[in-house]
Amino acid sequence: MKLAVDAMGGDHAPKEIVLGVKKALEEFHDIEVLLYGDETKIKEWLPSHERLTIVHSDEVIEGSDEPVRAVKRKKNASMVMMAQAVKNGEAHACISAGNTGALMTAGLFLVGRIEGIERPALAPTLPTLDGKGFLMLDLGANVDAKPEHLAQYAIMGSIYAEKVRGIEEPRVGLLNIGTEDKKGNELTKKTFSLLKETPVHFVGNVESRDLLNGVADVVITDGFTGNMVLKTIEGTALSIFSLLKKTFTTSLKNKIAAGLVKSDLKDMKNMLDYSEYGGAGLFGLKAPVIKAHGSSNEVAFYNAMRQAREMVKNDVSNTIKEAVKGGDAHE
């Protein structure tokens, strides 16, 4: 399979992106990579590889660019060329750590929506205390959503959890302000009724305080709420580790204690880092489009590539297409 990669997107591009690609090429012998970006800079970190094609691009979509305008005007940007390769059938999936809005725009305009999917959803796998993680969607592709959109999210998320994450009959929960069936606003109440009729294993309403305890394998919400939950989890984790660092440096006794638990703290930090699980998939498109975290290092970007490979290997996009046409989500 061929994977198209934007080498110039993200805070640490192209170095960490290219090193992540190198790691993926070493690990997976069934992939070829089309790497888009500044050829000279790319070759500093990966001069050549038999399964690598470097496609030079001298334009970059910056984080500050307005997404739609950038995609339309910067035709030779590494991100746009990457998405165009998928549209042209030159690659099976694409991955970028660049501007999220621009990647979603490129995905919609170039890769295109699956017929029957009204709104694509941005879906990362977030951490749980048991290390298994859970898929959450939507986390910002659409700030407004209808019950029908959330029902489609449930089908797409369930298929991904089963086909890619290997979870048999994944539990699907609806994020709400209480677990009772009648809780919530009009959106969640109507969505609850729809999900009871949807071909997924719906376990009812779930609360945000229970998410990291693994209350569900797939959690459904609108993009506005989902993005706030994501930022809250990120901010809380950063604050906790900031407090721990401050505490462990206040005295000699605490510094000694910090030395004793240093490796355990590192393991705990990795467990709470959702980039360890891969990138955020833009579900509902004709081919896999993966948004790697903007601050991705080599390992995080490798994980995003692993995720794209699994989606192609398990034919997730076509499975979603068939499910939306009326088939069962787990056929």
Image (spheres, rainbow, N blue to C red):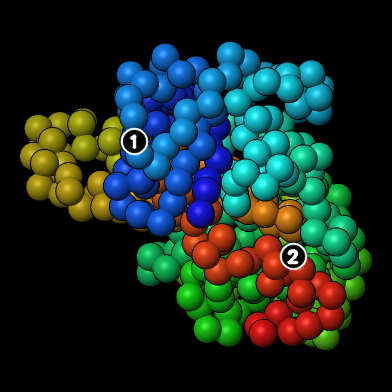
Q: Vertical placement of 55 versus 174: above or below?
A: above
Residue furthest to the front in view is: 50
Image coords of residue 70 (percent x, y): 75, 22
Q: Tell me if residue 154 comes above or below residue 48 in the rendering.
A: below
Three-letter amino acid code at disc 2?
Answer: Tyr
Q: Which x, y percent locates residue 148? A: 88, 67
The kind of residue tagged 1 is His
Observer able to see residue 100? no
Determine the secondary structure under disc 1. loop
Q: Identify the residue at horizontal 63%, vertical 66% (top origin).
A: 316
For disc 1, the neighbor class at 10 Å (few under 14, some 14 to 19, many from 20) is few
Residue located beneath label 2 in the image: 153
Residue at image coords 58%, 14%: 58
Disc nearest the viewer among 1 and 2? 1
> Does any portion of residue 22 appear in the rendered image?
yes
Which circle marks residue 49 in the picture? 1
Task: Give the image quarter of residue 209.
Answer: bottom right
- Give the residue drawn at x 25%, y 48%: 265
Give the quadrant of residue 82. Answer: top right
Q: Earlier in the sequence, mark 1 or mark 2?
A: 1
| Marks 1 & 2, CB-CB < 8 Å contact | no
Report how many numbered discs are placed on residues in the image: 2
* Frontmost residue, 234 versus 102: 102
User: In the drawing, does residue 94 fall left or right of residue 14?
Assistant: right
Above or below 229: residue 59: above
Quadrant that contains the C terminus? bottom right
Mark 1 vs mark 2, CA separation in Å: 38 Å
Q: Estimate the x, y position of residue 163 in percent, counting from the top left.
A: 55, 73
Q: Is residue 12 above or below residue 272?
A: above
Residue 115 picture quarter: bottom right
Nearer the observer, 38 or 242: 38
